[in-house]
Image (cartoon, rainbow, N blue to C red):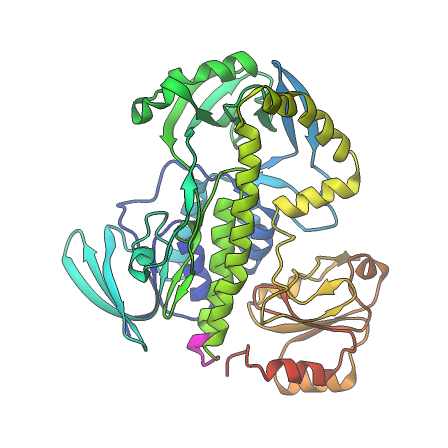
């Protein structure tokens, strides 16, 4: 075949999928119909869970160095800052990346493209998918090149990372139920001054028109994201920043000195009915789209890519095909919950009427500040927004529980006396961990099977993280727990692996 996997679309989702597959040893072609990477973007947030997974690609440090840390979220009402929600310490002790970080999608894509090129794979630009057919044992795809006509290629699998108007999804024939928000969104990259240009995130609650100001790396740079209603919304693509800037200037006292770029767009909330059709898969916006509330979209697409990549490589290496079914099982459930949650949050933020205004302007700042004054509430909020709480407990690949850790959970991160239990997880392989003492027969069996086993001397921080002493945790290549067994026995591991999740 021409490649193991044809990746259609070179946004963050497609690029991460190509990177992961290439690192695992699969051959990849990645195509995109655009002539060059985007120079503007709407996606901004890079969540802690994404950074944890990027550590496996040696990408996390580079993203942290280039991104902007957001220590707090500020809520404005009636022309003044009503509440400051401090999240600077919320993730400390939970993750090695305890902050919300801003890293615009265009800069993010350039970093991913450079890393992929360094691994020997380049994005094939001005190349689009014309169509494909699934022949059972392979995919035959027709490509159109802007410069030299058509090409027919064969691949073991095709991955649709081709956005909300996905041709791969259209050919699969799956539904894409949901709806479109009536509001017109705008985004502006500006150089500005004023109280909200302080490196923190600011949200104006005064009117039903949503407005948020995100800090960017660089002096006095910020990203404004808002909605437009009424007569102005009818201007659509003809809308200018001057048509919407008065609210930021009036309510948040922002002085805009320069507008680097401005764009408008509509947002949908949809989830495809299926994420897999035999040898074709849907990821990112091709599979699910939702409101920008919570900065979840790009991170969710990246999560799709990482979840699928190791399963595709396992199938290529001979693992039972059923392992590929778990991609949809695990990711579609999360996508549906996420779309529902972000839809509810956005509906509250933009609801019309006196009652909605009362809740948003008068009650929300008080209630949120009171609730988040408790450390446990701040940590829960951080875990949720950062996607650290995402789990696959209902997956066929998840078996058992040890301590407070269920199979399907993200392995808790713990650092004890400079020993970081995530250090070994930079290897994208199945591996086992024991906190305490590993049974001799388990050590011997893992050595015989060449399954990496790491033991950690028992310490109280492991107990606080919910881990059980001397228990066995078998970790998937994406650092989620596949098996959790209190007994720490080799037989539990043998029994689990008879299901065939690891390729031959």
User: Residue drawn 51% across and 13% down?
Assistant: 249
Q: Is residue 35 left or right of residue 492?
A: left
Residue 102 appears anywhere in the view? no
Main SS of the magenta part reads loop
* Residue 320 appears in the figure: yes
- The span picked out in magenta is 315-319
- Comparing 43 with 324, the one in front is 324
Which quarter of the picture shows residue 155?
bottom left
What is the x, y in percent for residue 232? 37, 19
The residue shown at (75%, 41%) is: 377
32 lies left or right of 351: left
Please tell me whether residue 103 is drawn above or below residue 428 in the rendered image.
Answer: above
Q: Position of residue 451 (x, y in %)?
A: 62, 79
Q: Residue furthest left?
A: 149
**x%, y% of residue 211?**
52, 25
- The N terminus lies in quadrant: bottom left
Residue found farthest to the right: 460
The answer to whether residue 295 is above or below residue 404 is: above
In the rendered image, residue 279, in percent from the top left (x then y), is placed at 36, 70
Q: Is residue 233 left or right of residue 249?
A: left
Residue 431 is covered by the magenta coloring: no
């Amino acid at each position: 075949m021409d490649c193991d996997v044809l990746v259609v679309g070179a946004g963050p989702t497609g690029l991460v999928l190509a990177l992961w597959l290439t690192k695992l040893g699969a051959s990849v072609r990645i195509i995109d119909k655009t002539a060059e990477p985007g120079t503007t973007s709407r996606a901004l947030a890079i969540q802690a869970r994404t950074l944890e997974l990027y550590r496996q690609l040696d990408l996390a440090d580079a993203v942290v160095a280039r991104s902007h840390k957001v220590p707090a979220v500020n809520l404005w009402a009636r022309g003044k800052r009503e509440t400051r929600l401090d999240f600077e310490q919320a993730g400390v002790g939970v993750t090695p990346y305890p902050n919300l970080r801003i890293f615009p999608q265009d800069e993010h894509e350039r970093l991913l493209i450079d890393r992929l090129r360094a691994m020997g794979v380049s994005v094939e630009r001005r190349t689009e998918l014309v169509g494909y057919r699934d022949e059972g044992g392979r995919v035959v795809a027709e490509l159109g090149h802007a410069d030299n006509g058509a090409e027919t290629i064969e691949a073991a699998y095709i991955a649709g990372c081709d956005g909300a108007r996905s041709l791969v999804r259209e050919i699969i024939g799956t539904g894409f139920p949901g709806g479109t928000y009536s509001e017109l969104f705008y985004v502006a990259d500006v150089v500005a001054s004023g109280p909200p240009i302080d490196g923190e995130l600011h949200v104006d609650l005064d009117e039903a028109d949503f407005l948020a100001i995100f800090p960017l790396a660089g002096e006095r740079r910020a990203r404004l994201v808002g909605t437009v209603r009424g007569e102005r919304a009818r201007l659509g693509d003809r809308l200018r920043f001057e048509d919407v800037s008065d609210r930021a200037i009036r309510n948040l006292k922002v002085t805009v000195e320069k507008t680097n770029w401005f764009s408008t767009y509509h947002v949908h909330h949809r989830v495809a009915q299926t994420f897999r059709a035999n040898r074709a898969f849907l990821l990112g916006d091709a599979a699910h789209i939702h409101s920008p509330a919570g900065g979840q979209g790009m991170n969710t697409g990246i999560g799709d890519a990482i979840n699928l990549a190791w399963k595709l490589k396992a199938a290529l290496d001979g693992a039972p095909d059923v392992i590929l079914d778990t991609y949809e099982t695990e990711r579609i459930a999360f996508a549906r919950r996420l779309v529902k949650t972000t839809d509810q949050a956005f509906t509250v933020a933009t609801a019309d009427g006196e009652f909605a205004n009362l809740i948003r302007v008068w009650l929300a700042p008080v209630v949120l500040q009171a609730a988040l004054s408790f450390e446990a509430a701040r940590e829960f909020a951080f875990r949720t927004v950062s996607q650290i709480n995402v789990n696959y407990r209902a997956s066929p690949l998840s078996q058992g529980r040890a301590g407070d850790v269920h199979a399907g959970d993200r392995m808790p991160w713990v650092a004890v006396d400079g020993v970081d239990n995530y250090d070994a997880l930079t290897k994208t392989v199945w591996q086992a961990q024991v906190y305490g003492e590993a049974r001799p027969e388990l050590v011997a069996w893992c050595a015989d099977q060449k399954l990496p086993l790491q033991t950690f001397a028992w310490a109280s921080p492991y107990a606080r993280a919910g881990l059980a002493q001397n228990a066995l945790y078998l970790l998937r290549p994406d650092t989620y727990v596949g098996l959790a067994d209190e007994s720490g026995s080799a037989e539990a591991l043998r029994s689990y692996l008879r299901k065939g999740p690891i390729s031959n």
